[in-house]
Image: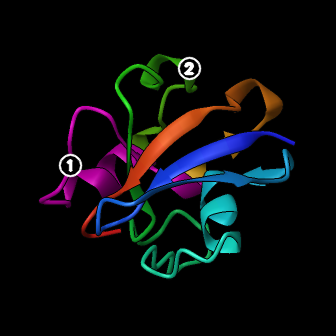
Amino acid sequence: MPILTVTNLAGATRDVTASAHGSVMEAIRGAGFDELAALCGGCLSCATCHVIVHPDDFARLAPMSADENDLLDGSDERTPTSRLSCQIPFTEALSGLRVTIAKDG
């Protein structure tokens, strides 16, 4: 099973093992990180699953859609490596991915 490294709002980092059949959002929520709101449940309508991908890992991701980009534009916390975790399919190829939960996530 792939490993995802998550840093929470307090700055604590934890590796979680997750299924390679869901999204990064599902992996984070499934590991008990309640601070990732994910209010729309992954329907690409709220941006409350905002994460910041480690810069060294960002190029491993597929490009974001125009809709994802538009939702992130509304965030005061957006960075050059911001993504919505519901839009990142978590696969074996992404094992080792490092993300930080954004303050508005």
Tell me how far mark 1 sits from mark 2, CA to CA: 19 Å
The label number, if any, that marks residue 24 in the structure image: none
Under mark 1, the amino acid is Arg
Residue 24 x %, y %: 63, 52
Which residue position holds label 1? 78
User: How far from the left and from the top, in percent, is residue 32?
Assistant: 62, 77
Name the residue located 50 percent from the left edge and 53 percent from the top edge. Answer: 6
Q: Residue at x 57, y 25 (%)?
A: 62
Which residue appears farthest toward the left when viewing the image?
Answer: 76
Q: Residues within 10 Å of mark 2 (few under 14, many from 20)?
A: few
99 sits left or right of 75 in the view = right
Residue 16 sits in which quadrant?
bottom right
- Secondary structure beneath label 1: loop
Q: Is residue 48 above or below residue 67?
A: below
Residue 98 x/y as whole percent: 49, 38
Looking at the image, residue 88 lies above or below residue 12: above
Q: Report the side of 21 relative to 80 (left or right).
A: right
Q: Nearer the viewer, residue 33 or 25?
A: 33
Residue 60: numbered disc: 2
Q: Residues within 10 Å of mark 1 (few under 14, many from 20)?
A: some
- The verdict on residue 90 being magenta is no
Q: Residue at x 45, y 65 (%)?
A: 49
Q: SS at mark 2?
A: helix
Q: Give the residue type at disc 2.
A: Arg
Q: Is residue 44 above or below residue 73?
A: below
Comparing 1 with 13, the one in front is: 13
Q: Total of numbered circles in the picture?
A: 2
Residue at (71, 72) in percent of width and height: 30
* Region in magenta: 68-86
